[in-house]
Amino acid sequence: MAESSDRHWSQDMALRYDELLGPTVFQPFAEDLARRVAEHRPSTVLEVAAGSGRLTRELLRSLPPHTEVVATDLNPGMVVLGARLCPEATWQVAAAGQLPFGDHSFDLLVCQFGVMFFPDKSAAWADFARVTRPGGLVLVTTWTDAREHAYADALVHAVEDVCGEDPPTFVVRVPHGYHDVDELTAGAEAAGLTEVRVHPVTLQGHAESVAAVGRGFATGTPLAAELAARGDLDEAAERIAEGMVRQLGPGPVSLPMTALVIEGRA
């Protein structure tokens, strides 16, 4: 997760994001996206908004050993954690829209669940096209409406119960706020990408503990800042976790999550 208003995540926050949310929410899509990348046999791959490196790790497992994988994220805490968990990749702090690479530097660019956070999406799409070689592939994923993601939907209701009439809107507004197919297609094509396609992918997210997922959302994402501004974060996190358990059960559970995969040629 990158480009959020909280640009300087602590390593503890990044670790909660990876450990509490990663296995359930991000791992299934990382495996799916790494398979898509591997089908194209790139020699050089740039991952933008790599977060803690869930996808990075799967890319390195799926690609031949000689493949160069460069991973970037705006948040230094994420880059430090990602480099520790996945030292085989080359890591650096970088902002989408201002990528520090030359034109046509990579065979393939991939961005998993980052584009929703970019303040200037047009600049990001343009930079994606710029650093990808002509004919190379750009692969981007974004979440659909929160109601199509079982854990996010339960989270939204739990936050409403905890916060009352004026709940934080981060979840609906940001990670689940950029999913209009026409808007996505127009953004990619305006950047010069061709053969743009957008298609939904629904995967199961397995959670041993629903409460742990709730704590991960509440303390390991920018939602934490909105909750902390309203009172005690730890108390709010526990109440949100309890609210999600009431809706989904304590776990283990496997529940559907839907995302969009956008692909285009540079």
Image (spheres, helix red, strand yellow):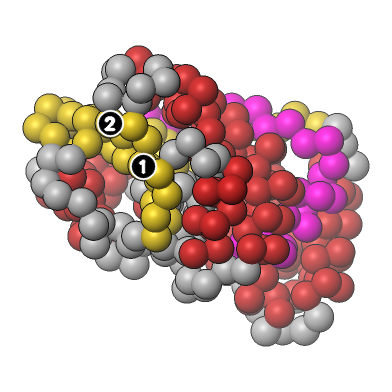
Residue range of the region highlighted in magenta in the rendering: 196-223
Is residue 217 shown in magenta?
yes
Estimate the x, y position of residue 100 in percent, counting from the top left.
Answer: 23, 57
The quadrant in which residue 223 appears is bottom right
User: Could you classify mark 2 by the number of other residues whose Cα lies within 10 Å: few (under 14), some (14-19), or many (20 or more)?
Assistant: some
Residue position for label 2: 44
Residue lying at 82% horizontally and 45% vertically, measured from the top left: 210
Q: Nearer the viewer, residue 76 or 4?
A: 76
Residue at 63%, 58% in the rendered image: 14
**Quarter-wise, where is residue 204 in the image?**
top right
Q: CA distance from mark 2 to mark 1?
A: 8 Å
Vertical position of residue 40 compared to residue 233: above or below: above
The picture places residue 102, in percent across and down from the top left corner, at 14, 49
Q: Are marks 2 and 1 in contact (CB under 8 Å)?
A: yes
Relative height, residue 86 to residue 62 (above, below): below
* Residue 88: assigned label: none
Query: Viewed as shown, does residue 108 lie left or right of 4?
Result: left
Mark identifier at residue 70 = 1
Query: With 262 as the anchor, is 77 left or right in this view?
Result: right
Question: Helix, strand or loop at disc 1?
Answer: strand
